[in-house]
Image (cartoon, rainbow, N blue to C red):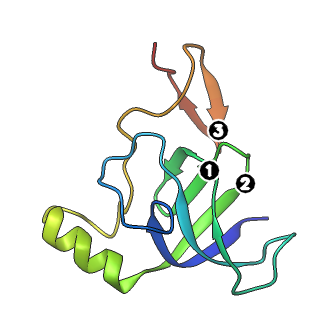
Amino acid sequence: MIIELTNWAVGGTIGFHKLPLDGQKLNGEVRNHSYYDDGTFTITSEIVNIKGHIVETKGGLLYRLIKINPIYRRWLKINFPSWDSKTPIIIRNPPMNNKEERGNGIKIKKRK
């Protein structure tokens, strides 16, 4: 099951993080989570894979990015004018080892 994340942003509870990501986390309100009630605020484990609006975390969970936090969206538009909502998150240096792995149907070459 894919967990939905609304009012999401990249980073912890204080401040936002720059893009592209470098082992960052998401935060937001979850829906369809097996452990948390709908609307519970959470911080994910590190992001390891992204395909469009589907994010896979180090913990193996899949999140669908639904609605971005409006303050974070404004921050992105100011700090990253080329930010595109169709590709909301980019991984530059994922925290991976040097062997190949499959994640969410995408073959990824691990960085050395």
Tell me which residue sits at (50%, 52%) in the image.
51
Element at label 1: strand
Q: CA distance from mark 3 to mark 1?
A: 8 Å
Query: Where is residue 24 drawn, in percent x and y?
Result: 47, 48
Tell me which residue sits at (75%, 85%) in the image.
38
Q: CA distance from mark 2 to mark 1?
A: 6 Å
Report the residue marked by disc 1: 56
The amino acid beneath tag 3 is: Gly
Q: Residue furthest right?
A: 34
Query: Where is residue 67 drawn, in percent x and y?
Result: 48, 82
Q: Which mark is drawn over residue 103?
A: 3
Quarter the N terminus occupies? bottom right
Tell me which residue sits at (45%, 19%) in the image.
111
Report the front residue among 25 and 105: 25
Pointer 3 and pointer 1: residues touching (CB < 8 Å)? yes
Earlier residue among tags 2 and 1: 1
In the figure, 101 relative to 48: above or below?
above
Horizontal side of residue 72 vs 100, given as left or right: left
Query: Where is residue 27 drawn, in percent x and y?
Result: 55, 68
Report the residue marked by disc 2: 61
- Where residue 72 sits, quadrant-wise, is bottom left
Pointer 2 and pointer 3: residues touching (CB < 8 Å)? no
Instruction: Give the number of the mark in front: 2 or 3.
Output: 2
Earlier residue among tags 3 and 1: 1
Element at label 3: strand
Q: Residues within 10 Å of mark 2 (few under 14, many from 20)?
A: some
Q: Which mark is drawn over residue 84?
A: none
Q: Residues within 10 Å of mark 1 (few under 14, many from 20)?
A: many
Pointer 2 and pointer 1: residues touching (CB < 8 Å)? yes
Q: CA distance from mark 2 to mark 3?
A: 11 Å
Element at label 2: loop
The amino acid beneath tag 1 is: Glu
